[in-house]
Amino acid sequence: MSSGPRHYSPYDAPMWESIGQRRMTLQQCECGSFRYPPGPACPDCGSLRYAWVPLSGRARLLSWTIFHRQYLPAYPAPTLVVAAQLEEGPIMVANMDVSIAAELALDRPLVMAYADHPDGYVIPVFRLSAPAGAATAAA
Amino acid sequence: MEAGSLDKSLARGAAVVGIGHTDWPGDYQRVRKGEKPHDSYGYAAAAFQQALRDAGLGRDDIDGLIVGPTTAYERMGEILGINPRWGGQGDAVQAILQACMAIHSGMAEVIALVYGNDQRSAKTQYGGPEASGGQNFLSYVYHSPWGLTSQGALYALMVNRYMQLHGMTMADLGRVAVAQRQWASLNPNAIMRKPVSLEDYLASEFIAEPLRLLDYCLINDGGVALIVTTPSRARRLGRPAVHIEGAGRADLNREATSLGPRLLEFYRPAQKLAAQQSYAMAGLGPRDMDALLVYDSFSPHIFFALEGFGYCDIGDAAGFIARTGIGVGGGLPVNTGGGHLSESYMQGWAHQVEAVRQLRGGLGERQVPGCRRVHYVSDVAGKAVSIIYGS
């Protein structure tokens, strides 16, 4: 297995392992709150207890930016980066295919998918959620 | 704490009596030619000598030392030859607040605040996986697997959401960079003095859309120093003193890495609290301010500051700027030296110097007429701070 992304705490490891299995999980506290980034304690209730729970994959778009300059070897410009609020509560930054940038709007429903990072690990990304009634066509 | 229960004895409890800084345009030219005029300590030392002269004080008068975040406290004291009885480290606003509190409590009487940064010649990284500040602010680095890096991109996300919510246009955004360059064109200490028009702005390249190159701060070497003391010592010096009339601070740490306070609140709760504290301490409000200086690593800061610190209604910042004017001759002069975008990126330190200069007066075309109060605000990474300077 190739080297994964940098871990900023020991709590990142189980999350990236679940992403590698294309079934992203986050810590859910006994009070119900989800933590992102993963961490030792619940900012809502202070509890140190949690369980790793799979995400629904549903999210809504909060904002986006297009990088017109290359900062990272894996991301030649232009690159579309979005911030989306997961159905579970946390906000997550991820990327989307830049070709759909013109279709973006606030609160646009998104769905999580998985993509291969050039450095040899899997990352969660977002795609436009199929409009209601188009599920059959998409399948 | 409710603003109403605030201890107001800190108001006018400290005064700035000395200012100094390096030759920013000269430093910039030399570094661009491949020279290395100083390291961060050297820039700070040069600024410190100027500030001492400006105050009419000698090094042995200094009994407190606060250094900026880019230099070590102990090494700076060693280089400057200062053995203080009190000291510490902080960013620009924390340095001012700490100095006020130390003077108020009697822990020190004459405090040197010194900052030096060789960020351009040292090629400090503000983007990428090793971005400066990433240890303190996880949001600067945590999202790099997805391509999000650089603090500019965080402000691009923040302002794009704002623009979508409130119908703000690219031209609205551009008015900040144009106005600040107008101020800078009158400032001999500014690095970027060539005026730009809104057309120039709209034709300039995007970096992290909707932000363009002209929305970004400069990256330059330089140093700044201030001498802060008690009002009575300031009077005895017989030189123009600028007083700190009020100060307030509030932080938003919860969900900072996942950008909640930026994207969902635009830092407003912290700005509001910091503003209330400082206004209550000074017995003043936004209408009493003759100029507003905003920590502007990126131009969107101005819009969020105008709303969060009470200058206009939520969603009305672009309208306020268009109606009132923030440039030369405008109803609310903002970043009258040119700010980080056009004067010098001294991470808020040069703004304190500009506040003192405006209140001392005599700046020619750049002088805000009848300037008696200058408001400095910052909201770097969710730490909202409000400082009110008065003559």
Image (cartoon, helix red, strand yellow):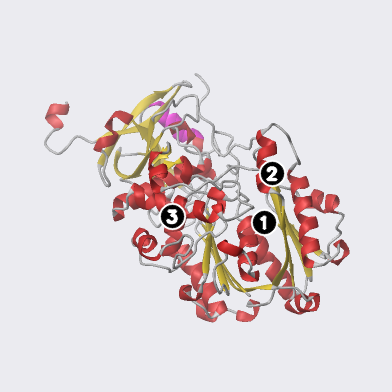
| B117 horizontally vs B185: left or right | right
- Mark 1 vs 2, N-terminal side: 2
Instruction: Give A55 or A106, whichever is nearer the viewer.
Output: A106
| A52 horizontally vs B166: left or right | right
Location of residue B162 in the rendering, given as x and y in whole percent from the top left corner: 35, 52
- Within 10 Å of disc 1 (Cα), the crowding (few <14, some 14-19, many 20+) is some
Give the extent of the magenta segment. Answer: A13-21
Q: At x 60% / y 64%, what residue is drawn?
A: B364
Q: Secondary structure at mark 1?
A: loop
Residue A90 visible (yes or no): no
Dot in front, 3 or 2: 2
Q: Which residue is mark 2?
A: B26
What is the CA distance from the residue labelled 3 to the residue labelled 1?
Answer: 23 Å
Q: Which residue is mark 3?
A: B261
What is the CA distance from the residue labelled 1 to the residue labelled 2?
Answer: 26 Å
Magenta residue check for A15:
yes
What is the CA distance from the residue labelled 3 to the residue labelled 2?
Answer: 39 Å
**Which secondary structure class fits the magenta region best?**
helix
Magenta residue check for A27:
no
- The quarter of the image holding the C terminus of chain A is top left
Type of the residue with mark 1: Gly
Q: Which residue is mark 1?
A: B90
Disc 3: host chain: B
Dot in front, 3 or 1: 1
Q: At x 73% / y 34%, what residue is drawn?
A: B35
Instruction: Give B323 or B234, whichever is nearer the viewer.
Output: B323
- Mark 3 vs 1, N-terminal side: 1
Location of residue A84 in the rendering, given as x and y in whole percent from the top left corner: 34, 43
- Within 10 Å of disc 3 (Cα), the crowding (few <14, some 14-19, many 20+) is many
Disc 1: host chain: B
Q: Secondary structure at mark 3?
A: helix
